[in-house]
Image (tube, grey):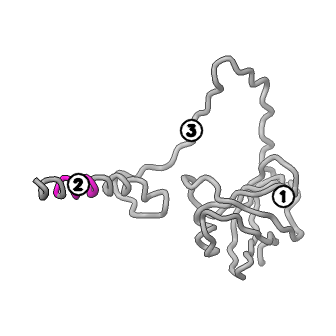
Amino acid sequence: MRMTVISLASISLLAACNGLQLNSSILNGGGGPSAAAPQDPVLQPAPGVDVGEAEPLAPTSPSAPSFLGSATTVASLGDPSLPGLWMETPLVAAEQQALIRSNRNTQVVVTLKPIPGEASGGSRLSIGAMRALGLPLTELAELQVLPPAG
């Protein structure tokens, strides 16, 4: 009886591990045939909630001013299902490339994506960028944002 319980528990644990493998594509794991491209979720307001008129996002234009200075921001982990090296930040008004440097003296070139908010507000960093910088995924990181080295 005891061996049966241990065997069933082992099988249950192995079955649970197989379920975790399906999510490994989020963490740059093996992209087998079951890995699909992430899709943007469609968000619906709760019943009875008036959302009013949403203002459209400003299109990215080549004439938009680029981030040329240097700034410091505190970043947390962004949406881990979105691939690539990016940082969502209120420091920019249009998408552009920038170099970010951590306190650990590691650096990576990322795409800055605009989000609404004060320039002193926080930023969100992609899981790929956090890994490239060697930062813990569960902590806030102080980052220096610089123009890309050209």
Magenta highlight range? 7-14
What percent of the width, then of the height, locates residue 4?
12, 54
Where does residue 98 sit, x and y in percent of width and height? 76, 68
- Would residue 101 be found to the left or right of residue 47 on screen? right
Q: Residue at 80%, 53% (x, y): give it.
A: 94
Q: Position of residue 15 (x, y in %)?
A: 27, 53
Label located before the other in sequence (1 or 2): 2
Marks 1, 2: nearer the viewer: 2
The residue beneath circle 1 is 91
Q: Quadrant of the C terminus?
A: bottom right
Rendered residue at 75%/57% (across/down):
123
Q: Is residue 9 magenta?
A: yes
Q: Which mark is residue 72?
A: none
Place residue 88 in its image quadrant.
Answer: bottom right
Q: Secondary structure at mark 1?
A: loop
Helix, strand or loop: magenta stretch: helix
The residue pinned by badge 3 equals: 41
Task: Tell me, yes or no, if residue 62 can be seen here.
Answer: no
Q: Is residue 78 left or right of residue 24?
A: right
Residue 13 is at least partly visible in this image: yes
Give the residue pinned by disc 2: 9
Element marked by disc 2: helix
Amino acid type shown at disc 1: Leu
- Rate crowding at label 3 as few (under 14), some (14 to 19) or many (20 or more) other CA atoms within 10 Å: few
CA neighbours of label 2 inside 10 A, class few (<14), some (14 to 19), many (20+): few
Q: Measure the alpha-carbon separation of dots 3 and 2.
A: 36 Å
The residue nearer to you, when weighing 137 against 12, is 12
**Image coordinates for residue 143, horizontal then vertical, percent:** 76, 70
| Secondary structure type for disc 3 | loop
Rounded to the nearest whole Å, what is the CA distance between mark 1 and mark 2?
Answer: 51 Å
